[in-house]
Image: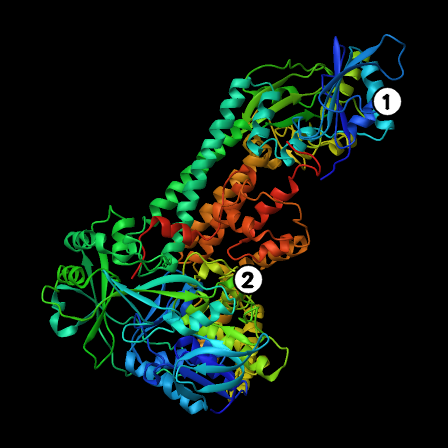
Amino acid sequence: MKPCDVLVVGGGHAGAEAALAAVRCGAATTLVTMRIASIGALSCNPSIGGVAKGTLVKEIDALGGVIAEAADASAVQARMLNRSRGPAVWGPRVQCDLRSYAGYVRNALRESGVTLVEGEVVSFGWAGDRVERAILADGREIACRSAVIATGTFLGGMLYRGRERWSGGRTGDPAADALSKHLSERGFHVERFKTGTPPRLVAESIDFSAMEVQQEEGNDWRLSSRTTVETSRKRAVCFTTRAGRSVIEAARSGLAGSPLYSGAITGRGPRFCPSFEDKVVRFPERTQHPVFLEPVGLDCRIVYAGGMSTSLSRRRQIEMIRSLPGCSGAVVASWGYAVEYGYLPGGQIEENLRLKAADNLFVAGQACGTSGYEEAAGLGLVAGANAAAGARGSGSRFVPTSEGSYLGVMLEDIAGADLTEPYRLYSSRAMNRLNLRQDNACRRMLPVSVRSGLERDGDEARLRSIEEGAGEISRALRTVRRNGVLLADLCRRTGFDVAGLAASEPSLSGQDPDLVFSVALDERYAGFVSRAERRARELDRLSEISLEGVTDYLGMEGLSRETREALQKARPSSLGEASRIPGMRPSDMECLLVGVLRRVPRGTSR
Amino acid sequence: MPRDVIAALASPAGESAIAVVRAGGEGCLALVEKIFSLEEGRLAGMRRALAQCPGTTPGTEALLISWPSGRSFTGEEMVEIMCPGSMRVARGVLVSLQKAGARLARPGEFTRRAFLNGRLSALQVVALASIWSGDSPEDGAEGSTGLEEAAGSLERAMEILHETLEAVMEFPDELAGEAPAMEEVVRTALGEADRFSETASRSECPLRVFIAGPVNAGKSTLFNILAGREMAVVSPEEGTTRDGASCRTIIGGRAVELFDTPGRRRNGEEAPSQVEREAVRISSGLIGPDDLLLWMSPGGRVEPDRDLSERAGWTIEVSSFSDVVRGDGLNLSARTGEGLEALRGAVASARPDGLVCSAALGIRDGIARAAESIDAGEFPQASEEIAEALAVLSSVMDRGASIGLAVERALARMCVGK
């Protein structure tokens, strides 16, 4: 088959962004997927974005990715989460029409010139530590200069429901067992995680009148900076209800046959996204749990039962569903199940997502332990850009910084990490969350995009105009006074209406109100940000301090058990190295520093 | 990490049956062996030895007790030298130690080393300080556990606030459980901060305040007012106060040890009596860099004594008799009561409190700012404040406080998931 520069295994959110990024970097790219029709599938919940995740989506958009545009084009409901809790944690999220989302991504791939191949990659052909070609199940071979593994839950995937258990990557799709075996044989370390999905119901079989309606909230923004805000678009209505005692009882009586509690599943699942039976076991005192009913499309009559993720048997599932208010006659369109899958733990991954033991093999998404469409898309983009650089043979690495982006935060956390559950991005994982906002994602990432050659046509001009505008606004904030007070100082006052500044300040008329808001927020948080930076610099100075000879972290005071265990395992050689252990916060570093300074003099023992 | 050898007189200065000199630090055993002419290694291990004191006639022997590193209370090599009770002998030992390379310990330095070497926690340091300062050991012990307990409750209250904030931010619509009510959580944290700061101010060393100034400035009058009882003799006669009174009292909500001092004669004028001169000399010698000097003169006419204000950490200038004559400093009149409140406030805020007290106040301010931020719809800022306050608490408490990812802790407590 036609040789390529970059070969991507998988057509999910990681694979699609990887292929698109590689093409933007000028690489001849081939994407191999088991089913072209499944490219861009939202396999679980129908939403894109959220707190931190929505900001990440905007970063990906600024770097030329497709996820934000696809979500805007297929949006059926938009919500800005945390609107009342501070702009730094605003979380733009849109619910999408499944089919139109996937169609948009497929189209984008086709139009970009990515070669789409249907087939299963079973192994790679190697020359030393270099991947030379991918070998497909039907015997075809594709020569490549570098490759990206973006297999989602397919690597050795195993599905569970009650006592049922079958090999698969997703319901209806076969698993990539051969590839998983091949990677293990090559000496890569493969571990297992677990995740799950709820049943889908037929809309006509539900009586929504008994439920609370969840309407769209505000429609005045888009995820993509390339999409314009038009006012008319079709909306979907979502509903919320509660799973009460009878649902909980049904789940509890099904526990004996649960693969999770019978020990059939050994991989760890995400605590932030537990199955219903998990919630029942872990929070036995709760008498009810919320359930979200979200249509998965405008013309599609399937409803996603958010909050009801389960791997109990079909009998228990229907018992649980029919005990929900308004669901006594509910018909299940597809059953919930759990999936256990292989992933490549971060210890063997570089920050540019290259597998350390291979010269030109990269990994992204669930295959390296993350969870979520947005995380997958972000890592896919990074893996694709680096695979393209690898294919060119240029030594350049595309690794956005963790100070400047959630994307960088994620890379730092994933590489070298020892995850205990699938990795989800939280805003609090960022050292300087106040800087990494959804409103300034473009200002932060467009320059990175242009520098790295990931930009799309017109991005450079767009960047110039944004920087020009931001410069003018910033100058105005630092020179114009209102009642004798500098605008920048006003912005820092608790309770000052930053959002209303553009409309109320004559010197800023003519400027883009969104940009005014964003630049004014920079001023608002400047004090906090500089404090965080000062702390980071102080720690930088201390990073040289040697930790050679420190053997007992478990007995060190002031650190959490998790941190102590992580240190004990990693045995960093210096404070600087310790600071790069995922989850280490400045405060942990301070405790560690005290611990080190307090060490009993060398050569003595208690 | 190796630390230099320090030495200090560990018993009160003055004549006593036995004087104790303490030396500690890397190499101190060898150093003591040398000046006492003991064979090398004589003091290695936990040993006792009798040896003639340097520079004395035979028969003047000291008892030496040594601890190897890791076994002494500071965690470092240490020797205690018990010499026959004469300051001359003890001073001789100290001088020899210094000549051999040791330096005089700063106040509290042994304890500081014990703390840095992990032998004492900050709270134990505070408890020791309150024992040394004359409170009964029982009080001290109680103070320590009380403080420990208050700190623990405060820590937990702040952690819950932090976790609640993070959970609410990260899972705005997935927090299946009703997250604890924010106002309630904030109120609890504020209450615990108050309790902690009260406990801390009770346990920690009081601020020492010296009232000084020219004769007949009204120092003893002020002393009695601040002490809340008549302890010092007041008379219009110059030089009434010789042995200055001292007492423990509360000024502006803060524990204070108050000292009255004999008045200074005017420029160059010699005090008429030897006793008075000696009293001035002794009282001045007490003032140190952690102390507050209240320099008082009628109408603020006399500049603070240079020597005193340089010794003291802080100086407040008071213009007394303000009902008769006004001055630049804090105008105070014992007759009308003018300036008394201002003075109490100034004393209370003059010096930063001790380690734990000032931390407690900072923590309370942090929680209050967080509460403001929450009201203003700025949860991330509130979270920053709490994280900072928790870091302060964990650094003074020296125990298992951890910031980590509050959201991960929240996951253990709260039911999340869509």
- On the picture, is B73 further left or further right than A32? right
Q: Are marks 1 and 2 on the same chain?
A: no
Tell me which amino acid carries mark 1: Ile
The residue indicated by pointer 1 is: B35
The residue indicated by pointer 2 is: A526
For residue B185, above or below residue A477? above
The residue under the point 72% across, 14% down is B242
Q: CA distance from mark 1 to mark 2?
A: 60 Å
Indicate the position of residue A244 as horizontal and vertical percent values.
17, 54
Image quadrant in which the C terminus of chain B is located: bottom left
Tell me which amino acid carries mark 2: Ala
Indicate the position of residue B266 as horizontal and vertical percent values.
79, 24
Q: Secondary structure at mark 1?
A: helix
Chain of the residue where label 1 is placed in the rendered structure: B
Q: Which mark is residue A432?
A: none
Mark 1 or mark 2: which is in front?
A: 1
Circle 1 packing at 10 Å, graded few (<14), some (14-19), many (20+), is some
- Of the pair A174 and A200, the residue shown nearer to us: A174
Q: Quadrant of residue A49?
A: bottom left
Q: In this orientation, does residue A62 appear?
A: yes
